[in-house]
Image (tube, rainbow, N blue to C red):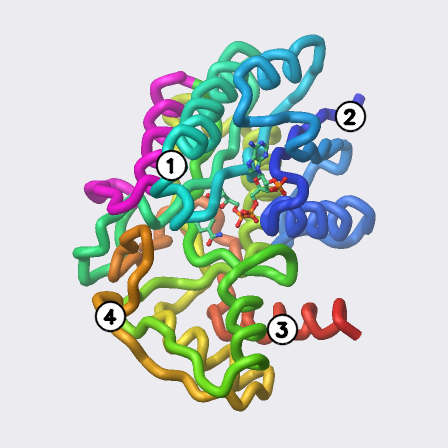
Amino acid sequence: MSRNILVTGKNGQLGRSLKKAVNLFYNSPHQSPNNFEIIKDLNFIFVARDELDLSNPQSINLFFQNKKFNGIINCAAYTSVDNAESDVESVEQINYLSVDQIAKVAKNLEIPLIHISTDYVFNGHSFKPYLEKDKTDPLNIYGLTKLKAEKAIIESGCQGAIIRTSWLYSEFGNNFVKTMLFLGREHESVRVIIDQIGSPTYAFNLAKLIIMIINDYLINKIFNSNFNIYHFSDDGICSRYEFAKAIFEISGVSCKLDPVRSKDYYTLAKRPNYSAMNKDKIKKHFPKLVMPHWRESLIYCLSELKNIRS
Ligand SMILES: NC(=O)c1ccc[n+]([C@@H]2O[C@H](COP(=O)([O-])OP(=O)(O)OC[C@H]3O[C@@H](n4cnc5c(N)ncnc54)[C@H](OP(=O)(O)O)[C@@H]3O)[C@@H](O)[C@H]2O)c1
C-alpha cells in the first residue's frame, strides 16, 4: 500500500520545485536524488491555500480530520519579509501558530514533519558560517516567527527535521533572480546591497534534499530521538551585489550595477549582514549529498527560465 506524504505550499517556489523533483524521481525508474535510495511507493499530495488555509486554525483541524498521512512536508509560509513588519498577526499565525498545530498533529499520528526555516533566525553579527547550535537572535518579525515555529516543533516532541535555508530562488514564483532580471531589462542601472553576505540556494537542490530526508526517515527511522535542525544552501558565499552581477553576466543583461550599503538602502525589515551557514552536519548525515556551487546552480536555473520563456 502506498504511503501518503502531505506537502503544503503547492504553488510556492519550493512547493513547485518539489513537484518537479517528485515528477523526475518518481516517474522514472532509474533516477534518484544524488543516487540515494528512495521508496518508490510514496504518494505526494500537494495542497494549496484553498484546501489548507494556515491562517485559519479551524481549517487546519478540519483538514486533518479523517485523513491519513505518513509524513508532512511544510513548504508554506508567509514569506514577504518587509510586509511581515506591519502584518504581525497574520505572519504569527501562518509562520508560528499553524506550525505548532501541525507539529502536534504529526506527534499524535507519530509521523515525521519536515519543516523549512531560515537564516534570518540569526542577527548576522558573525564572521564565520553559522552552526546549527549557534545563538539565534532574529532582527525582524519574519525571522522571529520562524524561530518560534522551530521551538514549537521541538517542544511538540514530534519527529522529523527542520531545514534552515537561505536566499531561495528558482524558475518559479517571485525571487531575487527574477526581480533582478526584470529590473535589469527595464532600467539602465540598479542599486544592489553590497554588505549582505550569504549563500543563494536553488530550490530544486533543496527539494532533492527533502526527498532524501523523508525517505531516510521512512527507511531507517533515524530521527527517533531528537528533532534535528540542519543548515542547507548551495555551496559558496557571496554578497547580494555579487549574486546580481552573476545573474546579469550569465544572462547577458547589460544593466549597470550600483553597489549600496544596507544603511543607505531603506527597507521596512532589517536583515542580517552575514547569514552564511555551516553545512557540515547535513553533509555528515548524507555523504552522497551533492551541493553545487551557487554559480553552477544559477547557470542551470537561468537555462530553465529560458526554456520556460521560449
Ligand atoms: N524565499 C526565500 O528566500 C527563503 C529563504 C529562507 C527560507 N525560506 C523558507 O522556505 C520555505 C519556502 O519558501 P518559498 O520561497 O517557496 O515561499 P513562497 O514562494 O512565497 O511560497 C509560499 C507558499 O506558502 C503559501 N501560503 C502562504 N500563506 C498561506 C496560508 N495562509 N495558507 C496556506 N498556504 C499559504 C503560499 O500560497 P499562495 O501561493 O496561495 O500565496 C505559497 O504557496 C518557507 O518556509 C520560507 O520561510 C525561504
Q: Using the numbered discs, state the Cα–Cα distance from disc 3 to disc 1 in whole angstroms.
A: 29 Å
Badge 3 crowding class, 10 Å Cα cut-off, few under 14, some 14 to 19, many 20 or more, is: some
Q: Using the numbered discs, state the Cα–Cα distance from disc 3 to disc 4 in whole angstroms.
A: 30 Å
Residue type at tag 3? Leu
Residue type at tag 4? Asp
* Rendered image quadrant of residue 87: top left
Helix, strand, or loop for circle 4? helix
Residue type at tag 1? Lys
Q: Which residues are magenta?
A: 132-157
| Residue 142 shows in the view | no
Between marks 4 and 1 in the image, the one whose residue lies nearer the viewer? 4
| Residue 289 shows in the view | yes
Helix, strand, or loop for circle 1? helix
Q: Which numbered tag is attached to residue 302?
A: 3
Residue contact between numbered discs 3 and 4, judged by CB atoms under 8 Å: no
Q: Using the numbered discs, state the Cα–Cα distance from disc 2 to disc 4 in whole angstroms.
A: 54 Å
Q: Nearer the viewer, residue 163 or 305?
A: 305
Q: Which numbered tag is attached to residue 2?
A: 2
List the residue tagged with mark 1: 146
Quadrant location of ligand 1?
A: top right
Q: Earlier in the sequence, mark 2 or mark 1?
A: 2
